Image: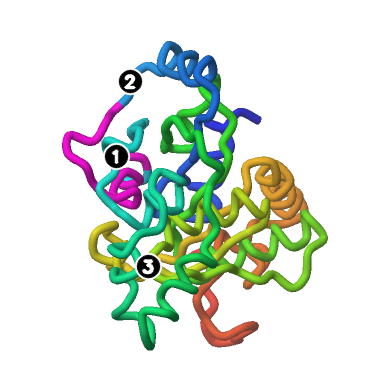
Amino acid sequence: MSYKEMQEVLMRELRLYHYPVAVKFFYDQAELDAFHKAAPEIYAPVKAMTFCQWELGARMKGQIVYSGAEGLGCGNAKYSFGWKDLDDAEIKGHAKYTKDLAQAERFVRSKSRLPEGLLGIAVAPLGAVDGLYEPDTVHFYCDNMQAYHLAVDYMAATDTHPLRPTITMNSSACGGNVSSYVSQEFNMLPACSGSYNAGKTERGEINVIIPGKQFGAVFDRLMDRIEAGSSSITRPGDGFPGADVCKNCPLIIFKKEQ
């Protein structure tokens, strides 16, 4: 299937509210030039903003967004992407979360970081990247039960159990994608204090991030379940995520009028 077809299945079967975001970290100039040449329209931040705000264009508006470091106004994200070194400002920015500055420094240093040399980042709806790039990560903003289904399919598809998500302070969208990319592992984490308000996750969305190289296997597992019965794990046979009622309740049943 094309990525466009995959997105259509995911939006329909998982009842997603947002488009899945295909994230690409560009390190090769020729690859970046090819992307700019092939993309029908590319949007850039008018002013420097956060990475989770970049993703708003992709997941809510269906836009292909690209920027380098000049369009990023978030120190946490710049540190995660290797666009700045650790400094006093970054440590002090985590002081409100930690017991003291020494702990803040240890916690920041323990975050995953991209290798140096990153040219720029593209975020786009999954369905828009056919012929443009292969995603490094696929980022879902979803609810609890949608996240559970994605996690279960990942575990089955990759023969991984249990999953151990990586949650870091003040870096859910940016740090979450970097961690998943560097480790090549599934990540599921709540919004951080920054992405909750700046990144517009007031609906209580959960971040699910799947490495691009593993995404095809996860999608194939979903398709296998659909072909076997339905996309719902909680109530097989129903549409995703299944009727929101007590399991096997004999009272909440509907039938067609005669």
**What residue is pinned by disc 1?**
61
Look at the numbered discs 1 and 2 and tell me whether their residues touch, using CB distance below 8 Å: no
Q: Residue at x 33, y 20 (%)?
A: 41
Cα separation between marks 1 and 3? 25 Å
Label annotation for residue 41: 2
Q: Is residue 24 magenta?
A: no
Look at the numbered discs 3 and 2 and tell me whether their residues touch, using CB distance below 8 Å: no
Q: Quadrant of residue 19?
A: top left
Query: Can residue 255 be seen?
Result: no
Disc 1 vs disc 2: which is toward the camera?
Answer: 2
Disc 1 vs disc 3: which is toward the camera?
Answer: 3
The residue tagged with tag 3: helix, strand or loop?
loop
Q: Position of residue 201 (x, y in %)?
A: 31, 63
Q: Position of residue 37 (x, y in %)?
A: 42, 11
Which residue is situated farthest in the right direction here? 159
Tell me the kind of residue under disc 2: Glu
Tell me the kind of residue under disc 1: Lys
The region drawn magenta spans: 43-58
